[in-house]
Image (cartoon, rainbow, N blue to C red):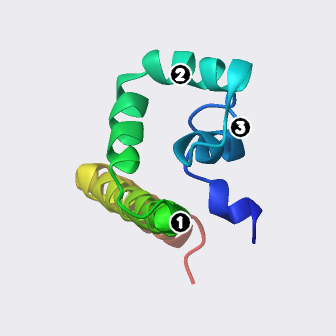
């Protein structure tokens, strides 16, 4: 379960350890690690906004709970978006599906007609 708690950046960037990010947000990093984290945050506008927002949380002890909730909501949003995309894909090509069905029907009908003329009973 502990690994699931740090998924917020698991797919977006492998350069920074999620535990290190959580330590930075809670003020536990110092020295080179802190400087490295600040440089990484400065290189990404999205991370700047995320760290700024998470840094304004009044209760740092509940920070992990907020991150967990964000991960859950992000995962649900991505699943919903994927589902909508798949539904849309089916709706994009109705004429192609209709054409395939018609061609198959014509082939089957043609097979029966040819069989009837070649092998009359």
Label 1 crowd bin: few (<14), some (14–19), many (20+), radius 10 Å? few
Find the residue positioned furthest to the right.
2
SS type, badge 3? loop
Q: Which residue is mark 3?
A: 17
Label 2 crowd bin: few (<14), some (14–19), many (20+), radius 10 Å? some
Q: Nearer the viewer, residue 70 or 94?
A: 70
- Going from N to C along the chain, the mark reached first, 2 or 3, is 3
- Going from N to C along the chain, the mark reached first, 3 or 1, is 3
Whole-number angstrom distance, CA of label 3 to CA of label 1 = 19 Å
Which quadrant holds residue 49? Answer: top left
Marks 2 and 3: which is nearer the front? 2
Whole-number angstrom distance, CA of label 2 to CA of label 3 = 13 Å
Q: Is residue 24 above or below residue 38?
A: below
Q: Nearer the viewer, residue 69 or 55?
A: 55
SS type, badge 1? helix
Quadrant containing the C terminus in the rendered view: bottom right
Q: Which residue is mark 2?
A: 38
Q: Are marks 3 and 1 in contact (CB under 8 Å)?
A: no
Q: Are marks 2 and 3 in contact (CB under 8 Å)?
A: no
Q: Which residue is mark 1?
A: 61
Side (left or right) of 55 relative to 60: left
Q: Nearer the viewer, residue 94 or 102?
A: 94
Give residue 15's position: percent from left, percent from top.
Answer: 69, 25
């Amino acid at each position: 379960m502990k690994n699931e708690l740090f998924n917020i950046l698991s797919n977006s960037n492998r350069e920074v350890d999620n535990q290190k990010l959580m330590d930075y947000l809670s003020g536990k990093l110092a020295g080179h690690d802190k400087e490295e984290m600040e440089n990484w945050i400065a290189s990404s506008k999205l991370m700047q906004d995320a760290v700024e927002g998470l840094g304004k949380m009044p209760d740092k002890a509940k920070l992990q709970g907020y991150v967990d909730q964000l991960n859950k909501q992000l995962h649900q949003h991505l699943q919903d978006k994927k589902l909508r995309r798949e539904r849309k894909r089916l709706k994009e090509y109705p004429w192609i599906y209709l054409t395939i069905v018609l061609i198959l029907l014509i082939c089957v009908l043609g097979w029966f007609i040819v069989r009837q003329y070649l092998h009359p009973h």
